[in-house]
Amino acid sequence: MLIDLIFIAAAYLIGSISFAVVVSRAMRLPDPHSYGSGNPGSTNVLRTGNKTAAALTLLGDALKGFIAVWVALHFQTSLGLADWTVPAVTLAVFLGHILPAFHHFKGGKGVATVAGIVFALHWPLALGLVTVWLIFAVGFKISSLAALIAALCAIAGMFYFFGNTLISWTVVAIALLLIWRHKNNIERLLKGKEGKIRS
């Protein structure tokens, strides 16, 4: 039980590292909370015009989701982790991202972190979701719309590959939280006022 709790706590702390903030500080850019949407994510960092910073933010946020879940999966058998530990780690790293302890609980929306999580769970599904995101992002040039559609596809994909299991329902919860984090974007989409990705 103790080792399970350690994995879950570690996942939350890993998730709490906001790479938008870390990269911005390292590259002497404004705090991502202070401009644009105020969201500490790669899309908002891109508004500075620094594509490298945005790419590093995307990569960092995806890697933390991947690493937390992959490590739990890798050691599940050898350390005798409980069946619920990997789902709990999955949820914990996502909650760390959207409610980071290191950044006054003001986190991002979690798109990149979810991508990393799914890559750790089932990389073919993750590649499919990335493809869906790219099709809608390039086609409509609206990042939030692409993310929302990919989130819905993630739910269907998890049940297709994993069936009616705890990890599938965990991803459902995460996808619904991601959609909820996009509530303002959804309102703007319905009004036709959502901003587009700048090339």
Image (tube, helix red, strand yellow):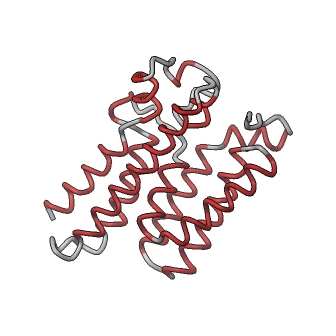
Looking at this view, is 80 or 131 the one in front? Answer: 131
Q: Residue at x 33, y 31 (%)?
A: 102
Quadrant (top left/top right/bottom left/bottom right) for the C terminus: top right
Residue 23: quarter of image: top left
Q: From the viewer's side, name the closer residue of 84 and 151.
A: 151
Q: Name above or below for residue 68 compared with residue 27.
A: below
Q: Residue 176, image x and y in percent?
A: 57, 56
| Percent coordinates x, y for residue 175 in the rendering | 56, 58
Most extreme residue toward the front, as rendered? 52
Q: Which of the pair 120/199 is nearer the observer? A: 199
**Which is nearer the eye, 167 or 129?**
129
Q: Position of residue 181 (x, y in %)?
A: 58, 43
Task: Tell me the residue at 79%/42% (across/down).
Answer: 189
Quadrant, the N terminus: bottom left
Q: Which of the 4 image quadrants contains residue 17?
A: top left
Q: Residue 127 appears at what percent x and percent y?
A: 57, 65
Residue 167 located left or right of residue 10:
right
